[in-house]
């Protein structure tokens, strides 16, 4: 079941029957739960183009980024299940659509410290199962322009945006030019508004896998029971 996935990631993902998940699948054009493409809504913007970059990942918030494993996938899954049972669910706070670093994302108004702490705990616990980054991976990350601290974190943990650099976000678009952001943000706020009025929690570690075609699939949810 797991052998045909080339990389694995641990994400936050809303429950598949939630308004948030359904809105996100339509917005992105990809439902990672069913493994099917979804028709974009007609919102007066070119969603197919705007969401081209984040589409393959599905609606998610990164906890550990896509990584190759240094062990059998089944070993990783066992460790993930044990970890989830030790972690308590965490509230995400009030969520809003905001531009960050040139793209649109759904982010907390104020990131809860408990969320930052839990994300750091997840990274530490799962790092022993991560294969080292290749020189190509390192060069690709560095090309985006990292601070000295982010580069150090990447070498330690395989990703530059962890620990104190962690910023929870659910990516909605690729990079946008400044003139485009207001229109796209307005459309996103209207589309996701009803779902974001609800309270959302990180209550499961969601295992995603990258298939051979590059699309990510939600393999399994591990409920946090700590």
Image (cartoon, helix red, strand yellow):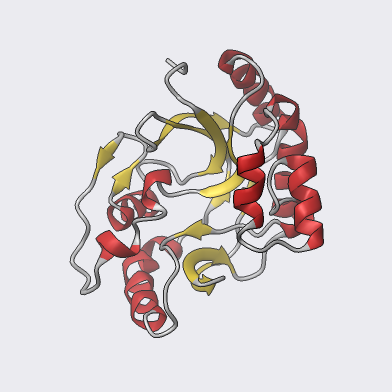
Q: In this view, does 91 lie above or below 121?
A: below
User: Where is the N terminus found, in terms of image quarters?
Assistant: top left
Q: Nearer the viewer, residue 141 or 149?
A: 141
- x, y percentage for residue 107? 55, 64
- x, y percentage for residue 211? 40, 29
Residue under the point 57% across and 14% down: 74
Q: Nearer the viewer, residue 156 or 98?
A: 156
Q: In this view, does 106 lie to the left or right of 109?
A: left
Q: Can residue 123 be seen in this view?
A: yes
- x, y percentage for residue 118? 73, 45
User: Where is the C terminus found, in terms of image quarters?
Assistant: top right
Q: Nearer the viewer, residue 194 or 72?
A: 72
Residue under the point 42% across and 20% down: 4
Query: Residue placed farthest to the bottom in the image?
Result: 179
Find residue 186 and report its image quarter: bottom left
Q: Is residue 126 above or below residue 40?
A: above
Q: In this view, does 9 lie to the left or right of 86?
A: left
Residue under the point 51% across and 74% down: 99
Q: Is residue 113 visible?
A: no
Q: Which of 198 and 46 is in front in this view?
A: 46
Q: Is residue 156 left or right of residue 142?
A: right
Find residue 147 and report its image quarter: bottom right
Q: Is residue 162 above or below residue 87?
A: below
- x, y percentage for residue 73? 57, 18
Q: In this view, does 102 lie to the left or right of 26?
A: right
Residue under the point 29% across and 62% down: 49
């Amino acid at each position: 079941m797991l052998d045909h996935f080339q990389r694995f990631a641990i994400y936050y993902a809303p429950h598949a029957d939630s308004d948030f998940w359904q809105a996100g699948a339509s917005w992105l054009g990809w439902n990672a739960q069913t493994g099917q493409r979804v028709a974009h809504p007609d919102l007066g913007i070119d969603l197919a183009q705007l969401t081209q970059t984040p589409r393959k990942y599905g609606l998610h918030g990164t906890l550990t980024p896509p990584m190759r494993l240094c062990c059998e996938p089944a070993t990783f899954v066992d460790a993930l299940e044990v970890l989830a049972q030790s972690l308590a669910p965490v509230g995400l706070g009030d969520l809003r659509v905001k531009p960050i670093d040139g793209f649109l994302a759904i982010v907390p108004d104020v990131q809860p410290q408990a969320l930052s702490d839990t994300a750091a705990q997840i990274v530490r616990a799962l790092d022993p199962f991560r294969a080292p980054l290749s020189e190509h991976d390192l060069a690709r990350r560095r090309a985006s322009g990292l601070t000295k601290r982010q580069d150090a974190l990447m070498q330690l943990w395989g990703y530059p945006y962890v620990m104190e650099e962690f910023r929870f976000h659910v990516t909605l678009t690729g990079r946008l030019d400044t003139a485009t952001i207001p229109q796209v943000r307005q459309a996103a706020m209207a589309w996701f508004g009803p779902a974001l009025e609800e309270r959302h929690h990180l209550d499961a570690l969601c295992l995603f896998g990258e298939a051979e075609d590059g699309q990510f699939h939600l393999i399994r949810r591990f409920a946090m029971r700590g």
